[in-house]
Image (cartoon, rainbow, N blue to C red):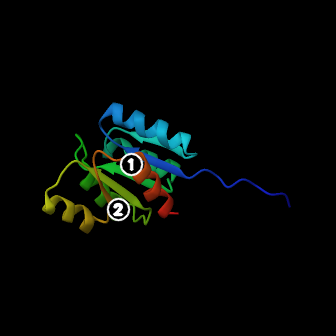
Amino acid sequence: MGYEEPMAKKILIVEDDAILRKVLTLGLKNAGYELFTAANGEEAIPLVQKEKPDIIMADLHMPVMDGLRFLRWVRGEAAMTTPVVVFTGSVQADILREAEEAGATVILRKPVKTAKLLETLASLG
C-alpha cells in the first residue's frame, strides 16, 4: 500500500461577523484546513449534520441562534463530542462559565490572534 496524505481536518466556523468569518476562513485554509461557515447556530445545524466537522468554532453572541444555544444543541440533541472552540469578546465571568458548563472545549477571547488559534487547533488533534 502506498503512502496517503492525511485528510485535511474539517472545521466549521459559526460567526455572524462576515469580515471575521472571511479572515478566519482564509487564514485556516492557508494552514491546510477544510472550512465550512455559518452566520449563526441555526445555519450551522445542517452543516454539522452533513459535514461532520472535526472541530467547531463558534462565537457566543450571534442573532437567531446564539453560540450557547448552538453549543447546547451540539452536546445535547446532537450528542457530539467534537471539540468546540468558543470565541467571544465578553469578559463577563458568568457568560464564560455558562459556555464552559455547556461543553466548550476551549474559550478564546476576541480578538483572536492567528498564532494562538492555530496552536489551539493543533492541540485539539
* Picture residue at 39% right of the left edge, 61% below the top: 78
Q: Earlier in the sequence, mark 1 or mark 2?
A: 1
* Picture residue at 16% right of the left edge, 54% below the top: 91
> At which x and y percent is residue 85?
37, 56
Residue 3 has which mark? none
The answer to whether 29 appears left or right of 71 in the picture is: right
Identify which residue, 113 or 51, lies in the foreground: 113
Q: Is residue 61 above or below residue 72?
A: above
Residue topped by disc 1: 45
Q: Element at badge 1?
A: helix
Q: Considering the image in quadrants, where does the N terminus appear?
A: bottom right
Residue 81 figure quarter: bottom left
Marks 1,2: beta carbons within 8 A? no
Amino acid type at mark 1:
Ile
Residue 106 has which mark? 2
Identify which residue, 86 or 91, lies in the foreground: 91
> At which x and y percent is residue 94?
13, 62
Residue 37 figure quarter: top left
